[in-house]
Each structure stands twice: as structure tokens, then as C-alpha cells.
Image: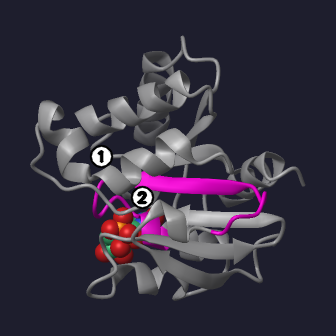
Amino acid sequence: NPFAGAQFLMSCAQLTQLPADGLPEIAFAGRSNAGKSSALNTLCSHKQLARVSKTPGRTQLINLFNVAGGRFVDLPGYGFAKVPKDIRRDWGRLIGDYLEGRANLRGIVLLMDIRHPLTPFDVQMIEWSAHRQLPCHVMLTKADKLSFGAAKNVLLSVRKAIAELPLASTQLFSSTSFLGLDDARAHLLRWLGG
Ligand code: GDP
């Protein structure tokens, strides 16, 4: 596993606190409860790596992890009941500034619970990455919750929905069964230039 040595680096409340080096970063975004922490832990073979992102006072911060060749950046999960026009404001300046301005950013991993794909916020994230000409890799999490056939159908419909975006990709993933784990690691490794 290329990400086995992952370690928590820092929590960050302001863009100016971020490391001022050129290391590539991969941002992880998703609705609260989408399985983002579990996916980070699974990718890094570390049971509690992303626990820090859930500790009080840190859930609204950007949490950074050192991995071989770069960093994983855990963005705060967005809430359940937001309407699209409020999304940008409520999700916070910090996240918007990071996504718009961080030169180190190489790509966005968007975690979606396979049972609730493509919420308005998810769509906005995908459009945002396209606007910045950054790759967006959608991981349909908790794929073990559906039959393989049903999961494949969701995969195909999400692929169809984002087919016109050349930098978007989609895969099934499960932190329980490890479905898609090798593909996810290989994908992210390429973004980090490995
Ligand atoms: P986060 O809020 O996006 O960080 O989500 P978590 O990683 O904390 O996961 C939310 C809930 O979904 C927890 O109860 C996890 O145990 C569960 N969960 C996460 N990933 C999976 C998965 O791949 N399969 C199953 N069955 N449950 C999962």
C-alpha cells in the first residue's frame, strides 16, 4: 500500500497556515456521513487516521495528512439540509478559498454514499472541479450496501450524468469489503505523480 505511512500533519483554519511548499495535494470532499473518514482510513490502512477530523473543534477545519509523495486534505463534510443557493455561503469561505486558490491541489476525491448520489452539492463540486480544470474522482461509497447489480446500475447512471466532463471519473468503493480499493489507490498515486 503506497499510503501506508500516512500521518496527521495539522488542522488549519486559514489558508495562510498551509504549508508553503510545492507538494501535491489531493482534497477529499463529501456530505457528512458519506464515508469520507472511513475511506481515508481504508486507503491508508490505518484504522483511526481520520479520527482527528471528527474531534470537537476540528470538524470545520481543513485537516492535512502527509502521505508518500504529497498530502491528503480532508475538507469539512457538508451538511444534510442545505439548499443549493446557500451552499457556498454555509460551507464556508475556507473551503471555497482552498478549492479556488490552492496551487498545490492536483485533484478532488468526491465521496458519495451510493444510496444518495449526486446531491446538489455534489453536482456543484463536480462543476467546480471542471471549472478549475482539475480532475474529480467520484467514489461511490458503501457499495457493499447494495447488490453488485444494483451498485453497477448506480455507477453507470452517475457515469452517464457526468459523461461530458473529461476530467471526471467514477468508481465503486467499500471500506467494509475493500471493493475498489486497489483502483482508488492506483488512481490517487497517478495524481501524486507516482
Ligand atoms: P464521514 O462523515 O463522511 O467521515 O463518514 P464515516 O466514514 O464516519 O462513515 C459514516 C458511517 O457510514 C459510519 O457508521 C461508517 O461505519 C459507515 N460506513 C462508512 N463506509 C462504509 C462502507 O464502505 N460500508 C458500510 N457498510 N458502511 C460504511
Callout 2, which amino acid? Lys
Residue under pointer 2: 142
Pick the residue in front: 132 or 117.
132
The x, y position of residue 55, in whole percent, is 33, 87
What SS does tag 1 mark? Answer: loop
**Who's the residue at 49% across and 44% down the image?**
99
Q: Looking at the picture, does residue 148 appear above or below residue 159?
A: below
Horizontal side of 38 relative to 18 (left or right) equals left
The x, y position of residue 45, in whole percent, is 67, 80
CB at disc 2 and ligand 1 closer than 8 Å: yes
Q: Is residue 159 visible?
A: yes
The x, y position of residue 164, in whole percent, is 54, 11
Quadrant position of residue 26: bottom right
Residue under pointer 1: 115
Pick the residue in front: 117 or 90.
90
Quadrant of the drawing holding the C terminus: bottom right
**Who's the residue at 43% across and 61% down the image?**
75
Horizontal side of 72 relative to 156 (left or right) equals right
**Who's the residue at 30% across and 46% down the image?**
115
C-alpha separation, residue under disc 1 versus residue under disc 2: 8 Å
The x, y position of residue 22, in whole percent, is 78, 57
Horizontal side of 149 relative to 3 (left or right) equals left
Which residue is outermost to the top? 164
Boundaries of the magenta span: 19-38
